[in-house]
Amino acid sequence: MNPINHVAIIMDGNGRWGLKHKNSRNAGHKAGLITVEKIINITIKNNIKYLTLFAFSTENWKRPKSEINYLFNLLENFLKSKIEDLNKRNIKLNIIGFKKFPKKLNKLLIKSEKKTFKNKTLQINLALNYGSKLELINAFKNLAKNKQKISINNLSKNLLTKNIPDPDFLIRTGNTKRLSNFLLWQLAYAEIFFEKKLWPDFNERDYNKIIKNFRKIKRNFGNI
Ligand code: IPE
Ligand code: IPE
Ligand code: MG
């Protein structure tokens, strides 16, 4: 049975769900947040220590301003109302991405990270304005600036995910089979589960089924 340390998720399909059920993409984002809370709980139940959630990519700035603002507002309200609870439950919030948000949100993100810094039950890595290509370019630039040798180890240490073990598996909901610039380096040996359901429809049973299937996979890492 494979141990599970780290699960990464591309939470895709909110917009389509919202359009289908409420004729509004933003309604899908709101519904998606409920799934996030459920998935956090199941992750803890399964004693998994790291959960990385792709919430906003460096490419998502191409979307209409109204949708971007809605997403950031949703996040702001979520943090304001839930950070105490997350902290009490010993959950650590860690942002991976290039913090370049409205000032108020930036402050709130930093405050939330500081508040939960020492927590140990689960570390949530929220990928916000995250893009793997930019992350890698920055890592190489750092190595060059500090005149460090280019090695796998040194590069890993200069990524936004430094000190975080690589994900054991990736789930992408929303019936799309691509990585969309997510953790390209870190997923080198991850198992990948593409899920047809849209993110707001993804539930405990679906997640547990993937966990169960993952545990049975023979992982080779190049060996036999
Ligand atoms: C993913 O859902 C969430 C974010 C990118 C914020 P989408 O908004 O991409 O939903 P679809 O893929 O358009 O249905
Ligand atoms: C990936 O979903 C980003 C997030 C889930 C935050 P997208 O919906 O942005 O991906 P593409 O554009 O369809 O590849
Ligand atoms: Mg999408």
Image (cartoon, rainbow, N blue to C red):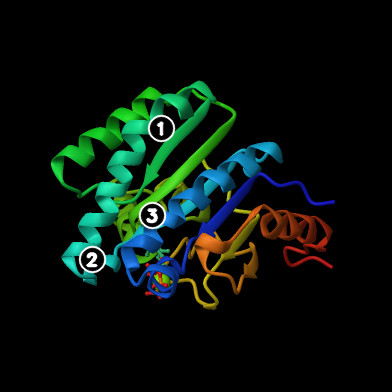
On the image, numbered disc 2 is attached to which residue?
61
- The residue at the point 52 percent across, 36 percent down is 123
On the image, numbered disc 3 is attached to which residue?
30
Q: CA distance from mark 3 to mark 2?
A: 19 Å
Residue 56, position as x, y percentages in the image: 34, 58
N-terminal of the pair, mark 1 or mark 2, is 2
Eyeballing the image, is 163 above or below 54? above
On the image, numbered disc 1 is attached to which residue?
82
- Image quarter for ligand 2 equals bottom left
Q: CA distance from mark 1 to mark 3?
A: 15 Å
| Residue 11 seen in this snapshot | yes
Eyeballing the image, is 61 above or below 212? below
Q: Which quadrant of the rendered structure holds the C terminus?
A: bottom right
Amino acid bearing label 2: Trp
Amino acid bearing label 1: Lys
Eyeballing the image, is 153 above or below 84? below
State the residue in front, 138 or 77: 77
